[in-house]
Amino acid sequence: MRDFNIESRGLLFGRFFKKQDKFKPTTNLLQVFGKHASKNVVEIDEGEKEKYIRGFDLEKEIEEGYVILKCKKDILGCGLYRDKRIKNQIPKAKIIPQY
């Protein structure tokens, strides 16, 4: 089992963007620890959940910035609220295609 090299270990918590002076949490972080969040949590319904996991943005009236998207007990991940919509932040590789 020594035929491979470990480059890193652990859980990526997020990225800090210097230009915007903002921290963006990763979906993995939110799915593990998001249930403990008390701020910037947006509850969405099943219809909005289906739309979001398929890669679409959502329209809401909330405070600008990054938000945690939650449907019932499920933490979906991170969204960026700007210009009266929540911009989808799910990585393209994880988006569920529409049939």
Image (cartoon, rainbow, N blue to C red):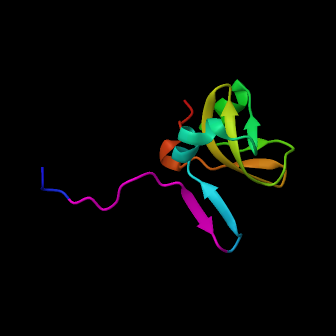
Residue 50 percent location from the top left of the image: 64, 30
User: Where is 45 relative to 13, above or below?
Assistant: above
Point out residue 60 in the picture as x, y percentages from the top left corner.
Answer: 83, 42
Q: Is residue 47 above or below residue 28?
A: above
Q: Main secondary structure of the magenta part?
A: loop
Q: Which residue ends up furthest to the right in the rendered image?
A: 61
Point 12% across, 55% down: residue: 2
Query: Is 71 a magenta residue?
Result: no
Which span is picked out in magenta? 5-18
On the image, which quarter does residue 41 sit in? top right
Decide if residue 83 is on the left or right side of residue 24. right
Q: Position of residue 39 (x, y in %)?
A: 76, 44
Between 26 and 53, the residue placed more toward the observer is 26
| Residue 54 visible in the current orientation | no
Residue 24: x and y, percent?
63, 57
Seen from the viewer's position, the closer of residues 58 and 14 is: 14
Q: Quadrant of residue 22?
A: bottom right
